[in-house]
Amino acid sequence: MSVKIWNLRPVSVVAICGAMLTAAGFATPGKAEGQFGSLDGSRLENTVTQNLTRSIRLPEIGLDDGARLAGLGSSRDFYFPAPRSLKYSATLVLAYESATSIDSRRSIEVLAGERSLILKPLGGAHERQTLRIPLEGVAAQNGFIKISVRYGHVLPDNRCVDIRFAGDHLTILPETSLQLAFEKNAVDSVATALTLMPREVAIYLPGRDLNSREFGAALEAARSLRESGRQVRFETMPGADATAKMEPGSRFPAPTTLAFMPRMQSPFTPPAAAPETVQNWTQGSILIASSEDLETLAGNVRTPLFRPDAKPGVNSSSLSLINFGTGPAVLVSGPDPQSAARLIGSSWNAAAVKSTVSAESEIFQMREDGRFTFDRLRADLTARDVVDRAQWSVSLAAKDLPVQRRITGLRLQVAIAPDEANSNAVVTAFFNERMMESVSTATDMRAQLAFEIPEGLAGLNNSLRLVVQRQPQGGECTTLPIGFPAQLLGSSEVLTSAAAEAPRDFYETSSMFRDGVTLFVESRNAFQQRGHLAMLTEMASNLIPARAPLSIRFIDGDTAPQTAGPFVALTSRAPENAEPPVRFDQGRTIIRGPEGKTIADLGGLKNATVAQLVRAGLNQGIWIRTAANDEDLVPPARLQLDRGNVAVVDKNGVAFAFSTERDRLIEVVYPEKLSLADIANAYRPWVVGALWLAFSLLVVLSVHRFYARGRGGKTA
């Protein structure tokens, strides 16, 4: 029996057949068997540890710096992911720091849902402490455990204090975490493993050269994990084909958040599982391998990857659970691993409730209208209590826009509850930290702000900051001000208009890629493949929409890509019929600004990585020319192609970007190969002087001859 789930919003349709393969197909006989197999370097079997702990810290839920509560009374909600089907025991590790400059009795209350867990007084002017709070009987709701922290004051003698200058705060530190303890075998579904997968994830690849579908699977998995805030690195499992091409122990230059290891010491040993009963799960693992790869690694695979009676379609592949090192891992396999890897970042991955699921991908060419609401964005729009101010921050990336659209304006709707004095509330909107609109409201329950985005203000990653302010009541008060709720509504809209036919900046290609993009990759060996994979992952996570279909095309080094639609070419030769803004066969390159002043002398670009916007016939795309030699191939730690149509890239990211089209502010000059026009422009003063001198001499000679003839006639 199979179940098809049709996703109408993304550009792909994922059919999940949970009954195609069951967990029994991966388990090995034995008393301590789990519901999925294990890969320990020799065979598929059970791992040593029986229990796991998973610590979900605040940076994993988007709070890298923790959270700050101030104003003599405030609260904050935290949502920790927790699968509803997993049996676990949970403990909240709350690390906080508090300080105050006034005499008051302060307290902190912690709630799980609506259930109070602890109410603790805070003592002294400064306090730093860590609390361990068991969450007995607390269950996940909608895939999350909600933890609320409330911070309050009681002032003696009914004194009034301006909360803006009280100098107090309660900071929830980043090391705060939710610890889940569970049996390893309790993780019996792909969805549960993906939900609980740690922030640091290693993607293991075969040691041989990858085919285009395996390359696409690695790229799909990596960009999906990066979208969820995880840090990704690529590691290669050794194989017979890779031994002759890479020296043992060689390591690719490793950026901080994106690295890979093309060759590991042989024999292959995955992260070792300690013999303790309880093991901390700190690294996630994704394996992309065929049955032959697993046989090479394991030496003895007791059960096949596919049951003999399973007959997946031509475009089908699977995600399977295996034990790998210290925790569960996801194996991507099958004839089309790219379609299975796409399920990792799909909104339907929660339906992967078996230990093995089959996925089949089909592409819809869907276009959207020119506006969309905030409830489609990944933003926290929950209500805030306004005592003196409340703030919302919304990220709006270029890849969130519909096909061939650009952002032109915003219409914001904010619901504001009136306070007891019906005082005015001021609502102010900032776009990319520029103040755009501000309104004042008294008894109205809803404030509306509408403004246009000037051309040139929006870019690759944009931010909207909305601030609601209300003056607290002062005077001879007996109680502190009460906060009244306000909320940025999900019905707020982003307005767009048709984008230019030919993008002028890198970020404008993002919406163009939404219907799909072809990636041309120059493939000579496994080492170069890993370098290109690392670079494309960093670029794709920032520029290519998450649900855009990717088509991988491997080409030879001396072949120009033949494009058909939007493209990204990571090749040494420009696409066919393309005229790039910067050439590589002209020698030394100089960038000049207005009035011919030299801005940068780039020298020879033969061994530099340069990204350019190019037009190949009727097709638009990005051409990234990497260094000429494999030894010079260093993937950048961060690659964000934003403004400009030319970018010079080094190991840290974009070193220099500029536009050769916008108002002709920038000019690219090749001094080692000058044309007659370049020579005339360089020596213009001398040329003008010479022409003026020649003209003057011609005039003098003409006048002299005229008078000479006149004198000759009179003499005659």
Image (cartoon, rainbow, N blue to C red):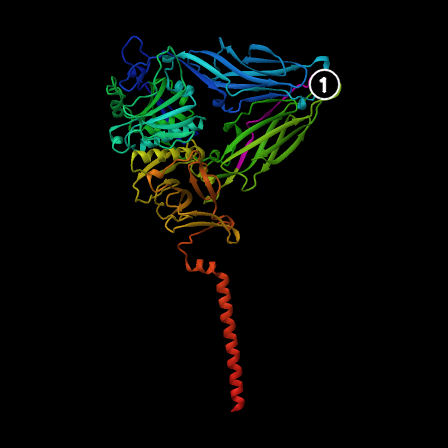
Residue 308: quadrant of the picture: top left
Instruction: Give the magenta range.
Output: 479-495
Q: Is residue 145 visible?
A: yes
Q: Residue 33 appears at what percent x and percent y?
A: 31, 11
Tell whether 442 sits left or right of 284.
Answer: right
Disc 1 packing (10 Å; few <14; some 14–19; many ≥20): some
Farthest residue, direction bottom: 716
Q: Nearer the viewer, residue 426 or 657?
A: 657
Relative to 700, residue 77 above or below: above
Residue 704 image offset from top left, x and y in percent: 52, 80
* Res 418 seen here: no
Q: Residue 332's x, y, as percent?
A: 33, 25
Q: Position of residue 162 (x, y in %)?
A: 69, 22
Is 499 situated above or below 363?
Answer: below
Considering depth in this image, is 336 or 561 the residue closer to the camera? 561
Element carrying mark 1: loop
The structure residue drawn at horizontal position 25% and vertical position 24%, both measured from the top left corner, is 296
Name the residue tied to disc 1. Answer: 160
Of residues 159 and 549, which is closer to you in this image?
Answer: 159
Residue 564 forms part of the magenta stretch: no
| Residue 483 included in the magenta stretch of the image | yes
